[in-house]
Image (spheres, rainbow, N blue to C red):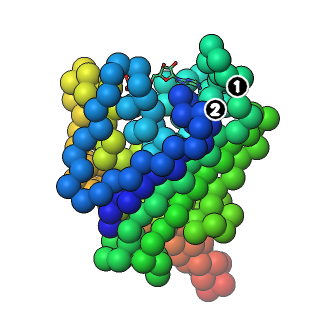
């Protein structure tokens, strides 16, 4: 799986349609302070389903829409399209190429698309589940994240390490299985009560 390109329109400082290609071997994006480097990383995180405006350095989600500059009016919509090469089917999808898109209008209307077909946030989440690159993963470390990890309590740090090591999802499976065992035990107890009454 490889990130091929990202197309941004109206997201943060990118008022005009901007396409950034990520050819093999590309290792960094450089630019002056305030030129939009972090905004690119945030656009990637946003299109993959980020739900927290705070994680995108805003207070509410429409803050990601271009809010105008000295010589330009604000825009009414933000759109980001992520193009992924999926020839190795690292992402569990039959498609060799994946186009994941998200749109947001200033009135709060929003939409997600996978290969041009409108879908739910859940579908985008499912697409990236267990790949280590989706929402909430640590594949994108933003400014402040490192400080946050260093300053976190040992128990919080443990949960971060468990998440990275892939233990977290097994803990979730364990919780679900434990719940099912408890429910089955309750049902068995109920059956035993009924049997006792019938004797
Ligand atoms: P640094 O090197 O200092 O970390 P950077 O290259 O990562 O900077 P960003 O933080 O990505 O830069 O971009 C900051 C710029 O984006 C600021 O000029 C800010 O005004 C602009 N910006 C952020 N949100 C919006 C928005 N909704 N509309 C217009 N411009 C925005």
Quadrant of the drawing holding the C terminus: bottom right
Label 2 SS: loop
Picture quadrant of residue 197: bottom right
**Quick one: quadrant of the N terminus?**
bottom left
Is residue 173 visible in this depiction of the protein? no
Residue that mark 1 sits on = 74
Image marks 2 and 1: residues in contact by CB distance under 8 Å? yes
Residue pictured at 47% horizontal, 78% vertical: 95
- Which residue is farthest top? 70
Above/below status of 196 relative to 84: below
What is the x, y in percent for residue 4? 38, 60
As drawn, the label of residue 107 is none
Tell us which disc is closer to us: 2 or 1. Answer: 1
Residue 158 appears in view: yes
Looking at the image, which is closer to me, 85 or 173?
A: 85
- Is 106 situated left or right of 116 in this image? right
Q: Nearer the viewer, residue 24 or 113?
A: 24
Q: Residue at coordinates 59% horizontally, 78% vertically from top-left?
A: 191
Q: Is mark 1 within 8 Å of ligand 1?
A: yes
Circle 2 is placed at which residue position? 65
Foreground residue among 155 and 190: 155
Identify the secondary structure beneath mark 1.
Answer: loop
Q: Find the distance from the CA under tag 2 to the CA under tag 1.
A: 8 Å
Label 2 CB, ligand 1: below 8 Å?
A: yes
């Amino acid at each position: 799986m490889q990130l091929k390109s990202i197309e941004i329109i109206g997201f943060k400082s990118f008022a005009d349609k901007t396409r950034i290609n990520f050819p093999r071997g590309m290792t960094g994006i450089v630019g002056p302070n305030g030129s939009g480097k972090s905004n690119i990383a945030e656009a990637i995180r946003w299109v993959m389903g980020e739900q927290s405006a705070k994680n995108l350095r805003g207070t509410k989600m429409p803050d990601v829409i271009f809010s105008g500059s000295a010589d330009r009016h604000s825009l009414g919509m933000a759109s980001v399209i992520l193009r992924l090469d999926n020839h190795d089917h690292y992402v569990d999808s039959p498609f060799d190429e994946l186009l994941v898109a998200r749109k947001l209008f200033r009135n709060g209307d929003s939409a997600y698309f996978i290969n041009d077909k409108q879908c739910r946030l859940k579908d985008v989440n499912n697409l990236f589940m267990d790949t280590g690159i989706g929402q909430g993963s640590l594949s994108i470390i933003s400014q402040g994240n490192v400080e946050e990890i260093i300053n976190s309590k040992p128990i919080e740090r443990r949960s971060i390490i468990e998440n990275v090591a892939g233990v977290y999802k097994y803990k979730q499976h364990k919780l679900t299985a434990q719940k099912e065992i408890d429910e089955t035990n309750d049902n068995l107890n109920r059956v035993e009560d009924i049997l006792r009454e019938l004797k």
